[in-house]
Image (tube, coloured by chain):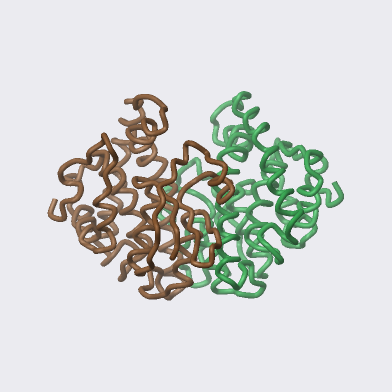
Chain colours: A brown, B green
Amino acid sequence: MHILYHQPISPFSRKIRVILAEKKLEAEFVVEPVWQRRQSFLALNPAGQVPVLVDVKSRVIADSNAIAEYLEEIQANPNLLPFDAIGRAETRRLMAWFDDKFNAEVTVPQVGEKLYKRLSGGGPPDSAVVRAGTQNIFTHLDYIGHLAERRNWLAGDDFSFADITAAAHLSAVDYVGGVPWDHNGEARTWYARVKSRPSFRSVLSDHIPGLQPPAHYADLDF
Amino acid sequence: MHILYHQPISPFSRKIRVILAEKKLEAEFVVEPVWQRRQSFLALNPAGQVPVLVDVKSRVIADSNAIAEYLEEIQANPNLLPFDAIGRAETRRLMAWFDDKFNAEVTVPQVGEKLYKRLSGGGPPDSAVVRAGTQNIFTHLDYIGHLAERRNWLAGDDFSFADITAAAHLSAVDYVGGVPWDHNGEARTWYARVKSRPSFRSVLSDHIPGLQPPAHYADLDF
């Protein structure tokens, strides 16, 4: 069985949990308190970040995109990258959009301040930073809506890594109550479709002690 | 012919220039002043970043890793990712190491402050930020040395995207005089081998008006 070192609300970890579930790959999930910088964990990944996958042959794979591509290569069914090179490029562009841009502009200001700062003993959230994250999400919701209006899924005809990456970030921000879903109906409808997939169930059932998600968080008909 | 929108000292752009040269793919190079946020460029890449590739059929590909993977898929000779899934994962892990971690800890503090801030009219460098980047590079040089001591190239037996990504960042920092090469002999020897490849020539001949690189920058026997 695979082992995944992860953090429940980390969007990079959630991406891999959803991919494992889509591909029906069984895994043991180990919650890693990354802020403790445990020596045995740093030996697995010197970058000190989750997710880290230890595969069935005990080989270590770090970095969420390296893991995603690896899982696509060893388990093609279902494919989560398109077959054509241009479609694959568009999917990877959108993965980078959410993992780099959305992450820096929305996830880190919101989830970092409201959740990880507390978990790691970093003190109360900086309200100016949270406010910036709150403002930045509007253009991202509009971009998702723009794509969802023109395509069946974000990167094209099929459900892909792009949808999983976007939904992983949005779900983390949604957990801390940071997504104004009323802002864009197309984005909301797209997210409802992702939420209803069985692969998303475990993400929707996460609970961090002392920080309840909003009532709509796990509601498929929100 | 391909068209590459780039910035000469951008490590993300340099990565793609070297890959194009390794694969002997001809391209027209267009320098894009990203800080001007030109509407016609934002139409190509809403993220507003270089590099952007327009392929031979006028299809647009943005994000340096999406471009790298695309070029690997359309032109396998020479392969710059290993054939086995674990080797590919290790290569991609190291690409992320340099594009995320090295970039944030070294490239942005050094190249961002000394070069891009000036090019974009952002004022003089913040010496405290530059100093942090100067300190952070030591552990990265040691990590490169550690890998180069144990492997033929950074990710394994063969020259790969990992070497290109690492060298793209180091070369950008080297341009602004920020690499203490005496610190780690193994890292220096590895970089000398990368530098001597014909694919690296164009990077070594870059010159930004008003900012000369140090004398050793283009020297193969530095």
- From the top left corner, tell me how far across and down residue A56 is, in percent: 49, 67
Choose between B90 and A106: the one closer to the eye: B90
- Residue at point 66% right, 63% down? B160
In the rendered structure, the answer to whether residue A32 lies left or right of residue B113 reads left
In the rendered structure, the answer to whether residue B46 lies left or right of residue B50 reads left
- From the top left corner, tell me how far across and down residue A121 is, in percent: 41, 28
- From the top left corner, tell me how far across and down residue A151 is, in percent: 28, 65
As drawn, B5 above or below B106: below
In the rendered structure, the answer to whether residue A26 lies left or right of residue B21 reads left
Quadrant assignment, res B103:
top right
Residue B46 makes an appearance in the image = no
- Residue at point 71% right, 66% down? B157
As drawn, A41 above or below A71: above
- From the top left corner, tell me how far across and down residue B96 is, in percent: 55, 52
- Residue at point 49% right, 46% down? A49
In the rendered structure, the answer to whether residue B144 lies left or right of residue B120 reads right
